[in-house]
Amino acid sequence: MALKHCICLKDIPLFASVTPSSFHPICQAATKRYMRRGEILFHQGDKVDAVYLVKEGSFKMVRLTEEGQEVILQIASQGEIIGEAALFQEQCHPATAIALEDAKICHINRRLLEEIIKKTPDLAWQVIASLGSRLYATWEQMTELNTLTTREKVLSLLVRLAREHGEVCPEGTRIRFHLTQQEIASMVGASRVMVAQALKELITSNYLCREEKYYVLRDRCF
C-alpha cells in the first residue's frame, strides 16, 4: 500500500495543545498510509499495538456478536482517533475497522504514545477529554435505542452523521459516505426491512432525499 510522508498531524484536535518539542517525536514515529474504501485497518480480536489517527475519510467500527450478527459501534472520521481506549492497558480490538471511503491515516506505536502522554500534561488532558466525549456519545445512543421508534432512530442517526460527516449541498446536508440499509440497521438495532420502511417514510415526508448513493438531510431536520 502506498505511503505518503507529507501528511501532518498537527491540525488534528488531539495535538492542538502540544508544544513543537513534544510534537516532534510523535510526528517522527507516525506511519502514514492510504486506504481504499472497504479495506480493513484491523480485525476484531487483533492485539492493540498502535493508536490510529484519521487524517481524511471515515471508518466504521464493526463488532461481530456471538450469534454472528454485525453491529456498527461507531463511525470515526477526520480528526478522530481509533484505539485510544486501550492506552495504558493490554487489550485486543473490540471491533473491526473498515474504511467507509478512501482514507488517509497515521498510526503511532501505543507504548511510544503512552510515554509521550506521561511527559505531556496537555496531551494527557486531550486524551481524557476524547474518552469522555466518546463515553457521553455512547450513553446518548443507548438512550435512543431504548426509547425511540425505528423511524425516530433512523432520523436521529442520519442527523448526527450529517452534523459530524456532512457537507452542504443545494438540497441540504449530504452525508459524505455511502451507507447501505443494512449498515443503518446495524447502527440502530433494527431489521433491514424496518429501516427500509422508515427511510421511505422520511423521504415521502421530505426529511431526506437520495443523491445518487448518498443520503441528504433537508434543512428542516436541523
Image (cartoon, rainbow, N blue to C red):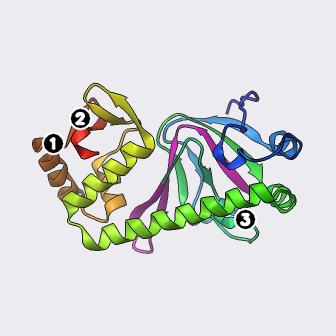
Outermost top residue = 170
Looking at the rendered structure, the secondary structure element under dot 1 is helix
Relative placement, left or right, of 127 versus 213 is right
The relative height of residue 140 versus residue 113 in the rendered view (above or below) is below
Looking at the rendered structure, the secondary structure element under dot 2 is strand
Could you say where residue 187 lies in the image, as x and y percent from the top left?
36, 59
Q: Quadrant of the N terminus?
A: top right
Q: Is residue 46 visible?
A: no
Q: Is residue 123 visible?
A: yes
User: What's the CA distance linking mark 2 and mark 3?
Assistant: 40 Å
Q: Which residue is mark 3?
A: 87
Front residue of this view, candidates 33 and 139: 139
Relative placement, left or right, of 161 versus 33 is left
Are circles 2 and 1 on residues that touch, CB within 8 Å?
A: yes
Could you say where residue 83 lies in the image, as x and y percent from the top left?
64, 58
Q: Which residue is mark 2?
A: 210
Q: Quadrant of the C terminus?
A: top left
The relative height of residue 159 versus residue 43 in the rendered view (above or below) is above
Which amino acid type corresponds to the residue marked 2 in the rendered image?
A: Arg
- Numbered tag placed on residue 203 in the rendering: 1
| Magenta-highlighted residues | 49-74
